[in-house]
């Protein structure tokens, strides 16, 4: 079965197997999906700036012309040579599934297909199509764990010739991890801020990632966890008024529910004691916010937490697709989850 484990993907992308002609890159971390797709595209023997050799599509293109993806795969480059078809924002659309199956049954010698998708469930048609073919492979992308975040911090700060104090590192870890591109962007801003120095300290991290809206973001997330609808509405109003993008709140909420999902997995799957799990993971959260997290872990089961993760991922994607409506999209998504929290609390 052509399916790589999450920890194998980075090494695979550095040296992809030439027998594969279609790559499905999927998972809840959209930033990591995008970053890995970009890295993989550089291994294809094409000039990424050449519009005759590279075709970029999204789901809107497929809706308008369902046959276009297959047509592009079967086309020949105007001046010969290899071609790259890059599909973004895919789900289980039939044209995308059909394209992957077509490559699996009759691999084109000079065409590579890269498909970026969201968090596909096991057994979904697109995953099955990529996993079952001899010329296709599925590459999962899950949100960075503590080890990956440490590595990302070392990579970005190391490139800038910077070291970081243990306390500053811990502060950074608390603010990173929901989305790879967002995390990398924060680290690059921090590196630029500390240019010309040797070490990053707590005040530097606070200056870059701890802006005035941070408290409101934490308040908003805690209101979502506890089902405090008036408090959430007030916090979101402050955040929007401060010109902070509401996607920051969505990402922060996403990280919290990823933690809740892991904790519920230990409780429900491994039969760990709830108090033990809360004690272990509660150390990663500021003491002021622990009651909201504990309440959420007790109220949300694993299935509900996964549903919320899917809901938040879709909301993040919609804010990117429709930036002019992002405040309305984000507010609606967060209020819906807070309402569900309120009902579970009762």
Image (cartoon, rainbow, N blue to C red):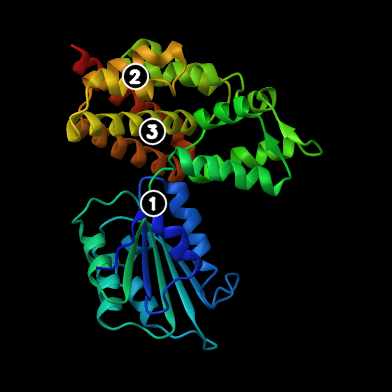
Q: What x and y, as percent, mark residue 225? A: 33, 19
Q: Which residue is mark 1?
A: 141
Q: Tell me: 278 left or right of 80.
A: left
* Residue at 44% in and 21% down: 285
Q: Nearer the viewer, mark 3 or mark 2?
A: 2
Q: Specify whether 53 is left or right of 12.
A: right
Tag 1 near tag 2, CB within 8 Å: no
Query: What is the spatial separation of the Cα atoms under label 3 and label 1, in whole angstroms?
Result: 15 Å
Q: Is residue 263 visible?
A: yes
CA gap, disc 3 to disc 2? Answer: 21 Å
Mark 3 and mark 2 residues within 8 Å of each other at the beta carbon: no
Query: Can you tell which mark lies on residue 164?
Result: none
Whether residue 339 can be seen here: no
Q: Earlier in the sequence, mark 1 or mark 2?
A: 1
Residue at 38% over, 20% down? 282
Compared with 57, 322 (above or below) is: above
Q: Nearer the viewer, residue 154 or 131?
A: 154
The location of residue 124, given as percent across then percent down, is 20, 56
The percent position of residue 257, horizontal first and vertical second, equals 33, 30
Quarter of the image for residue 252 reads top left
Q: Which residue is mark 3?
A: 254
Instruction: Tell me the quarter of the picture where residue 210 sits.
Output: top right
Which residue shows up at 25% across the image and 61% down it? 126
State which quarter of the image contains the N terminus. Answer: bottom left
Gap between marks 1 and 2, in whole Å? 28 Å
Q: Is residue 91 above or below residue 283?
A: below
**Splitting the image into 4 quarters, where does residue 224 fall?**
top left
SS at badge 1: loop
Camera-near label (1 vs 2) is: 2
For marks 3 and 2 on the same chain, the one whose residue lies earlier in the sequence: 3
């Amino acid at each position: 079965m052509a399916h790589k484990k999450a920890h194998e993907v980075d090494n695979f992308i550095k040296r992809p197997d030439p027998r594969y002609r279609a790559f499905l890159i999927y998972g809840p971390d959209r930033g990591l999906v995008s970053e890995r797709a970009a890295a993989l595209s550089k291994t294809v023997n094409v000039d990424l700036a050449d519009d005759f050799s590279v075709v970029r599509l999204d789901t809107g293109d497929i809706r308008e012309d369902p046959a276009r993806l297959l047509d592009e795969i079967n086309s020949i480059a105007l001046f010969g040579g290899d071609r790259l078809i890059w599909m973004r924002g895919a789900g289980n659309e039939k044209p995308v599934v059909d394209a992957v199956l077509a490559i699996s049954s009759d691999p084109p010698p000079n065409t590579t297909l890269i498909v970026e998708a969201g968090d596909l469930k096991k057994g979904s048609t697109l995953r099955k199509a990529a996993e079952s073919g001899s010329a296709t492979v599925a590459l999962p992308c899950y949100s960075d764990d503590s080890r990956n975040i440490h590595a990302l911090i070392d990579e970005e700060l190391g490139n800038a010739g910077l070291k970081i104090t243990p306390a500053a590192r811990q502060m950074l870890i608390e603010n990173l991890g929901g989305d790879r591109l967002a995390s990398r962007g924060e680290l690059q801003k921090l590196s630029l801020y500390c240019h010309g120095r040797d070490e990053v300290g707590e005040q530097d991290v606070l200056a870059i990632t701890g802006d005035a809206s941070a408290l409101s973001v934490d308040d908003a997330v805690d209101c979502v966890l506890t089902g405090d609808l008036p408090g959430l509405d007030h916090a979101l109003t402050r955040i929007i008024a401060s010109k902070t993008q509401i996607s920051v709140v969505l990402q922060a909420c996403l990280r919290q529910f990823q933690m809740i999902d892991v904790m519920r997995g230990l409780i429900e799957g491994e039969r760990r004691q709830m108090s033990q799990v809360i004690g272990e993971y509660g150390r990663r959260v500021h003491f002021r916010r622990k009651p909201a997290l504990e309440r959420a872990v007790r109220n949300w089961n694993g299935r509900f937490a996964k549903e919320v993760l899917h809901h938040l991922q879709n909301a993040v994607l919609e804010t990117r697709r429709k930036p002019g409506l992002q405040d309305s999209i984000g507010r609606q998504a967060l209020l819906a989850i807070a309402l569900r929290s309120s009902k579970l609390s009762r």
